[in-house]
Amino acid sequence: MPAPNLTGKVAIVTGATTGIGKQIALGLARAGAHVVIGARSLERGEAARAEIGGDVSVLPLDVSSVESVRAFSEAFGREHAQLHVLVNNAGVWHSDRHTSADGYELTFATNVLGPYLLARLLRDKLEEGAPARIVNIVSGFASNYDAHDLMYEQRDYDGLKAYAQSKQALRMVTWGLAARLDPQRITANAVAPGFVRTEFSRNTHGFIAGMLAVMAKLFATSPAKGAQTPLWVATAPEFAGVTGKYFVGMKEKPGRFGDRDAITDLERRLGELAARARVRAA
């Protein structure tokens, strides 16, 4: 299969300083795209840029912070008239409950609120770049969604359950985008990269985290292989106009979590969280 030619196209990849994100950025750059890395640490972002080579730039971005997401979107808009590919890859899980700069549970803020807000704030640039694609990196490990306790304020905190909730919610965000956007202009799809060796568990401890680290060494695939399906969905010509789908291992799978009322309710809650953070920052 010939590699796509993305010369003249602009792509954003979050969480691209290491692991799958860096491999996705590398693949997009090799295809000729100008790749913008959104990085919490500019030092790590510049190191990734130098390693990737090609036409790559770095902008500061803490996906868990509403203010940072807004600043990133504004900075991107000043430098680029169009956006053709948005890959929401940044993700975390923590053994203990932490909060973002806005006071929100950190896993949810990073894995759900940030991607939701980026897609919303960059929609005009995606429209200008149409046909454009949004690719949300999700997980096969998705469940435990509780619309009334998104921040784990009522339940005993469990890092893996909080992560699973966030990845279910990100699929729901993806289906909501797909339902609203004209697929001939902007598509939105969800991709699970599989069990990949990354630095993903660096913020964890305890028995389960230790077991996952051992299993990763024994059974997990490489970041380069984990990036294959996201790159395929982000670039392949056959996905023109294809939206609202879930992909794993270079195949489409049932996406689940498509209840329209639940999705609408989640989008409303996310909008309120973003607005509340903005008022608090002001």
Image (cartoon, rainbow, N blue to C red):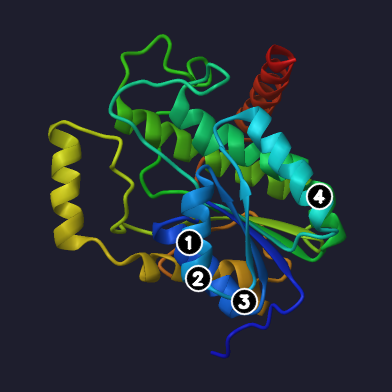
Q: Residue furthest bottom?
A: 2
Q: Position of residue 123 (x, y in %)?
A: 79, 48
**Residue marked by disc 2:** 52
Q: CA distance from mark 3 to mark 4?
A: 26 Å
Q: Which residue is mark 4?
A: 77
Q: Which residue is mark 1?
A: 48
How crowded pointer 4 is (Cα within 10 Å; few <14, some 14-19, many 20+) is rated as some
Against 84, is 93 above or below? above
Q: Is residue 180 left or right of residue 47?
A: right
Q: Is residue 16 left or right of residue 203?
A: right
| C-alpha distance separating marks 1 and 2 | 6 Å
Q: Residue at x 47, y 38 (%)?
A: 168
Between label 2 and label 3, give the one nearer the viewer: 2
- Answer few, some or many: residues within 10 Å of disc 3's Cα (few below 14, many 20 plus, some between 14 and 19): some
Report the mark closest to the observer, 1 or 3: 1
Do the residues under discs 3 and 4 have CB atoms within 8 angstroms? Answer: no
At label 2, the amino acid type is Ile
For marks 4 and 1, give the one nearer the viewer.
1
Q: Which residue is mark 3?
A: 236
x and y percentages locating residue 184 in the rendered image: 81, 64
Tell me, for residue 122, which label it has, or none.
none
- Dots 1, 2 in contact, CB < 8 A: yes
Q: Is residue 270 left or right of residue 201?
A: right
- Counting from the top left corner in percent of width and height, residue 92 is at 41, 39
- Secondary structure, mark 4, is helix
The residue lying toward the viewer, choosing from 84 and 77, is 77
